[in-house]
Amino acid sequence: MLNDAAGFREVYIAPGRTDMRRGIDGLATIVKQQFQLNPFQKNVLFLFCGRKSDRIKGLVWEGDGFCLLYKRIEAGRLQWPRTSEEVMSISREDFRLLMQGFSIIQRSTIREADISEIA
């Protein structure tokens, strides 16, 4: 379920560190107050990562109640974005890459000036 994001309309990740002691109510409050999103959107997955990059929590509203997901990666760590304070909507491909341990945040770009200096 969590490896391919099948069945979710959208996937949002909360960059930075989240207190992983939070439960359903605490995570729903983050979604609502910090990110100004509705946690009651059906089949929308919200993902959170704590200090340890080998554990994530997911929150999804299924229409009749919340489902709290918890995953601990046995080998390796997630390349979780830590710098932004805003929630990020990611594609299924980005989600798949994240679950495989790849970084989904581009750290630097090639500027036009850099390309023209080469030519």
Image (cartoon, grey):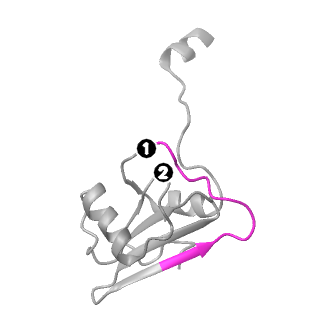
Q: Residue at x 56, y 53 (%)?
A: 80
Judging by the rendered image, the residue that carries numbered circle 1 is: 84
* Residue type, label 2: Gly
Nearer-N-terminus badge (2/1): 2
Report the span colored magenta: 69-83
The image quadrant that residue 53 belongs to is bottom right
Work out whether 96 lies above or below 113: below
Seen at 52% across and 49% down, the residue is 81
Q: Which quadrant of the figure has residue 10?
A: bottom left
Q: The C terminus is located in which quarter?
A: top right
- Residue occupying the far right of the picture: 75
Residue at 28% x, 90% y: name it: 64
Q: Give the spatial CA distance, label 2 vs label 1.
A: 7 Å
Q: Which residue is mark 2?
A: 16
**Residue at the location (48% across, 42% down)?**
83
- Asked which secondary structure carries label 1, the reply is loop
Q: How many marks?
A: 2
